[in-house]
Each structure stands twice: as C-alpha cells, then as structure tokens.
Image (cartoon, coloured by chain):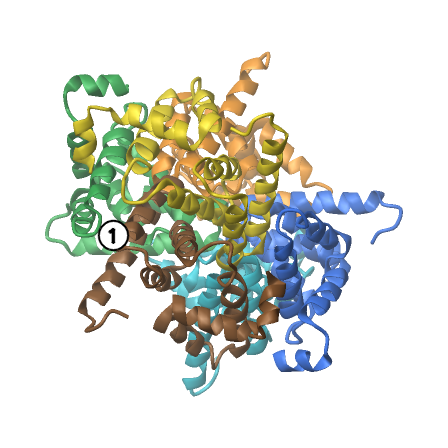
Chain colours: A orange, B green, C yellow, D brown, E blue, F cyan
Amino acid sequence: MTQEHQMTGESRLERGRRALAEIDGQAGENVVAALADIAPDFATYLLEFPFGDIYSRPGLDLRAREIATIAALTAMGTAAPQLKVHIEAGLNVGLSREEITEIMMQMAVYAGFPSALNGLSAAKEVFGKRDVLPLTM
Amino acid sequence: MTQEHQMTGESRLERGRRALAEIDGQAGENVVAALADIAPDFATYLLEFPFGDIYSRPGLDLRAREIATIAALTAMGTAAPQLKVHIEAGLNVGLSREEITEIMMQMAVYAGFPSALNGLSAAKEVFGKRDVLPLTM
Amino acid sequence: MTQEHQMTGESRLERGRRALAEIDGQAGENVVAALADIAPDFATYLLEFPFGDIYSRPGLDLRAREIATIAALTAMGTAAPQLKVHIEAGLNVGLSREEITEIMMQMAVYAGFPSALNGLSAAKEVFGKRDVLPLTM
Amino acid sequence: MTQEHQMTGESRLERGRRALAEIDGQAGENVVAALADIAPDFATYLLEFPFGDIYSRPGLDLRAREIATIAALTAMGTAAPQLKVHIEAGLNVGLSREEITEIMMQMAVYAGFPSALNGLSAAKEVFGKRDVLPLTM
Amino acid sequence: MTQEHQMTGESRLERGRRALAEIDGQAGENVVAALADIAPDFATYLLEFPFGDIYSRPGLDLRAREIATIAALTAMGTAAPQLKVHIEAGLNVGLSREEITEIMMQMAVYAGFPSALNGLSAAKEVFGKRDVLPLTM
Amino acid sequence: MTQEHQMTGESRLERGRRALAEIDGQAGENVVAALADIAPDFATYLLEFPFGDIYSRPGLDLRAREIATIAALTAMGTAAPQLKVHIEAGLNVGLSREEITEIMMQMAVYAGFPSALNGLSAAKEVFGKRDVLPLTM
C-alpha cells in the first residue's frame, strides 16, 4: 500500500492536502492556518501522517473512519475542538445527523454519560451553525 | 423508538440477551456469568441498557456500532478485557481483520502510538486464538 | 431489588424523574430539556438508567452516592459541566461545603493537583452562585 | 487545622504512619517496603502528604474518604494495584462489601461499563482472598 | 535529602514559597490567592508538597522538571489552566519557545494529535500575552 | 528543517531506523518485529513519523525528549509496555536512574500518587533486568 502510493508520484503532503480538503473542509484549513506562526512543521506533519498516510489507506472507507474518530474523541473527552471538526467531517463524508448522535449515545456505555452528553452538546452546536449558513458546506 | 420496542412485547432484558448473544457470543455470556456471585443486578443492567436499549436501536447498524466501540476502547486504553471482547464482536458482526487493524492504526492519530500498539497487540491475541479453534465462533 | 421496584408499579422513568428532581434539582431538569431537540431518547435513558436504576438502589444512601460522583468527576477532569451539577446535587442531599472541598483536596492524591484545583474552582463558582440567589434551591 | 496538628507535637510522618496502618493495614506497609530500594524518599512523601496531611484532616470521616477514593480509582481505570489496596481499606474502615459494589456499579454511569466491570472484578479478587484467610485483617 | 532540608532550618512552606516564586512567578501567586477563600489549607499543601518537597529536590534541575511537567500536562489534556502556568514557568526557568513547541509536537506521538494541537494553542496564547507586556516577566 | 532532511538524501524510513536503534535499542527492534504479521505498514509509520520525523528534529536533544516521554507515559498510566521501553531508552541516551525516578516522583503532583507508584514499579523492573544482564545494552 505504501508502495502503491509511491508509484502514483503524488507526495504524502499533496495526498494529505487533498484528503484534508475532502474530509475536514474549511475547518481543516483553519487548523493548518492557525499553526503557521507557531509550529509550521507540525502543519506539514498533520497533513502527511494522519491525512496523507492514514486516511488515504484503502482498507476502510471514509464513512467508517469518521465513525471511529467521532467515537474516540467523544469517549476521550479531552479534545473538544477536534471533536467539532470531526462532527463536520462526518457530515462531509456522508454520515447523517442521526448516525452521529447514535454514536454519541453509544459512548455513554463505554465512557460514561458525561462524555455522551458533552458529545451531544458539541453536535448540537455544529448542527446549529450549519442550519444558519446560507449554504451547508 | 422506545415506544416501538414496548409494542413488540419483548422486555428490555430479553431483547438485550438476544443482542448480546448475536454480538458478543460466548465472551458476552462469560461476562454475565462472572457477575453472578458479586453483582447479579449489574448483569441485568448490562443486558438491559447497553444491549437492550443502545445496540437494539435502528439508527446505526451493528457493523458501524462495533467500529465505534473498538475505536473508543482502543483510544481509552483502560479497558483491555472489554477491547478483546469487542474485537471478537467486530468479527462476529462482519468486520474483517483488516478493518479492525485499520481502526487501531487510525487511533495512533487521535490517542497516540501506544494506544494503537496496545490495540494491535490485543487484536493479534484474539486473531491467534480463533486460528487454533476447530470452528471459529 | 429490581423485582421490588417492579412491584411498586412505578416505572423506571417515573422513579428516575423523581430521583433526578430530588438529587439534581433544576440543573437536572435543564440537562433533560437541552436534549429535547437533539436526542430526546437519551433524556429518557438518562432518567431511566442512572436515576431510575442506580440512584434508586437501597444499598448506598444519596449522601454517599454524591461523594462517589463528585470524587470521580473531579478525578476524571473531563466532565466540567456535570461536576458543577453534582456539586449542587451534593449540597441538595446534605453534604456541607466543607465536605465537598475535602473530597476535592483528597483527589490531589489520586489524580494530581490540577484535578483538585479545577474541582475547587468549580466549587467556588457553584457556591458563589448560590450565595447571590434569593433562596438557595 | 494544620496548626492544630502542629500543636500535638506529632510529626506528619508519625501521623501518616498511624493513619496508613489504620486505613491500608498490611497492604499499605507493603507499598512502603517496596519503595525502600528504588525511591525511599517517596515512601516518606506518601506517608506525609496523603496520610499525614489529607486522611488526617477532620472535615470528612474515613468511611467517606474511602468511598471517594474507591469511586475515583474505579472511574480512572489506570490504577489497578491501588484500587485493590483501597477495596481492602474500605473494608478496614467499615464499608460493607455491598456498599463497595454499589460504588462500582454507579461508576458505570460516570466512566462507562468497562470501568465498573473492571472494578467489580478487582473487588471479587479482594473479597475472595479475604474469605480464605484464617482471620480477616 | 529530606534530612538536608531539615538542617537548613527553612520550613517546607518557606522553601515552597521561594520555589513557587522562582518557577511560576505571578501566575503561581494567583493560584495561591484564588484558594484563599475556598480552601486555604490547600494553598499550604500546594506550596509544601509540590514546591517545598518535589521541585526543591536536587536530583533534577528546574529546566528538566518543566520539560516533564509541560509534557505530562499536554499529554493528559485535562489541565488547561495549569498547562498555561507551566508554559510560563518553562520560559521562566530557561526553556526557549522553540523547545516548548518541540515538546508539544512530540506529544502527538504519545497522546495523539489533538493533545499536541491543544498544547500548541495554549502556547500560542501564552507567547502572545508576553509579547504585548511592557516587560516580559 | 523538513527541507534540511530531504537534502541529506536519507529517507524518513532510514533516518527513523537509525534513530530507533540509537534510542530504543533492542526493545525498539522487538516492537517492529512484533508488528510484522499483524500490521507491517504500522511498523513503517512508527519508524517514519515518531523516529524519522519527531525524534530526528534538532530543536530538542534526545535527553530532553526522553524526559518528556517518560513523564507523559507515567502520567497517562495507559501505556505500561511503552513506558518500560522508554525507561530503557532514557538510560540509553544518558539519563541516570536517579533522574528517571525523580521524573516519576514529580508525576505524583500532576497525575496522582498511583501513577507515580506504577511508574516507579516499572522502573524497578527495568533496572533489575539490566542488573542481571552480563552486559548492559
């Protein structure tokens, strides 16, 4: 798989940039921009490893990958800004609002009711913002 | 939805027992049995809420639910026995071994390389046990 | 115990609603209300399992249960809104302010000084709000 | 309070040693002994701060303190050896086995079912060991 | 070591106050002041154990101690206010801004990209505040 | 920096392999070998990102990097096997045993006494193994 990518001639950075745009949309661009003056190399790593390497792998589709990410970030409870980005990302790659809230309710079982409640609260905020946008992204 | 279940006449406990058998198989039965002499009511709650309520909801299929659970337990890193049960459960509801290892690799991004390595180590153990069984469960 | 409850004829939902009102007061009502438009079934689960099942069990009094919850949420450090609700709840079921701050100081031993400091900061906020209310709830 | 202690003439170390013996019994002595060749000063700190300072404070009785500690360690899920010591400690200061298992079941609400299951499993092990001892400690 | 300190005649509280001033500067004073009306004894413990005992030990210099603290708080992700205090502290004891951002980038490996991103975001805020001060502390 | 590396002509994988050998020694090789039959691509990522990218950066020396890693893994408490590898790594890059135990004692302040105790217990095991080897690695 790693080999296969090398054969397309596309660099990890280019592949990562493309994957980030598809998955996280504007929210992802904002994260990269915010890193420019404090840790620009970290923006490169973020594009290369998570997006260029992991999300670009063929063994699991993007829908399944966002289910995994939303579940993990909800359960961990330590990454509120990233959870909001990935609620957006989930919608971007085809998850319905109902599916996202189902994932969060399920996390009550594994990480407790507070993590589910805080996840639902983040979802409410993200859904609400998209409702008032002229065009959903 | 809650209403719908009440109309089938099947109790939460019966529904939970059926869901547990389908999802966790023998490993789930073992958990329930282990609770008998220390906290039998908790076995009832485990059947009723996670399995009778959450896993029985129609909004997300069992394959997606196990992706979420495997991701969360790998990221949390505090639930080794439950992670092994859900690697089994993932295979039971149709996830491939490759899909399970993809989820774990992805967790390196969100919860660090140690959580991914410990998840892969658990998967290796579960896959290995199934290989030596006369019949996979 | 489960049986005993069934015999009173009171449903888990009714019992949970009564326990929530007694323990969390208005703060608990607010959580349930906030779920109405995003995940109404989850409000039902929240009333049924934590309050209708767990807090309604006779084996541990409400004072002891709130000590456990305040300790756990302070130590976890991932559930700030819920910690505030349970500082209120602790006062509602008879814990003194001093007892609540003692629990938080003790958490420095088990989860580190930051978790204790953040717990004390939440307590300061909740106590301060009650001081300016015309009637404590 | 700090002043009061200073007036008894008992040092923090002496007070801590006495509190440790009362609360943790032999299990506490074993922890102190295990530190002797790797970090003897840390054994001193352990006696002085948690036991000489915190557990010796009058604002919360030992029963309540052990409820808090057992809840926190069960919820955290990262301190299995210490949880077992404090299940013993809980029994030493007057908690019943039923009360301890109630605390653990309640943690399912705040930290998820796996943390409760792992806590119950630790309790089962500790209770089992005490059953086969000629004299409970 | 403990003995050595006792021989200087300086109390743990005095030694802790001196260490806190050197390491955390004004931010540390603020924490102590904020505890005055809710838990004054805890301010004493904070000065005595972390600063009077641990940071005053000769086996590791303050630069190394702040590397350890910044790394741990970034990885834990549950102590945002304390992380900011220790980014200041790191600068106070001689770490460069670059070294602090390197520590945070490294935490992506051990605790995931969100913890590194949230750490970098805290660093950006602290660095920015110092840039607008008439005199950096 | 990223550019500088590209100019040496050494690939991230080669650079990572060299850094892993220098830092983690045989323990690192064992981790890579264990991944061969379950997730060989993940062994590549592990060499490339943590070791080829992060540990190869010039902004922080290896001694400081291991202080950060040992602190973080001790505080997290969810990565026992990786903590042991990095206690070895710390010794490999020049940390003394005393410095490693100082880091762990300090973690009592930030993540609680159990995390420090479990870290010291891991250190005791690693130090003990090296004492009985004919040649320290």
Q: Which residue is mark 1?
A: B127
Q: Residue at x 51, y 46 (%)?
A: C100
* Residue C61, percent from left and from top: 34, 42
Q: Residue A48 lies in what quarter of the image?
A: top right
Most extreme residue toward the bottom, as rendered?
F134
Residue F85 appears at what percent x and percent y?
A: 46, 67
Q: Position of residue A70 (x, y in %)?
A: 44, 35
Residue type at mark 1 is Phe
Name which residue lies at 38% across and 48% down: B74
Q: Is residue D73 above or below residue C35?
A: below
> In the image, C37: left or right of F57?
left
Marked residue chain, label 1 = B
Write down the quadrant of residue D127 in the picture.
bottom left
Side (left or right) of D70 relative to B22: right
**Dividing the image into 4 quarters, which one contains the C terminus of chain B?**
top left
In the foreground, A61 or E59: E59
Toward the top, the furthest residue is A134
Q: Quadrant of residue F108?
A: bottom right
Q: Is residue A68 above or below residue F117?
A: above
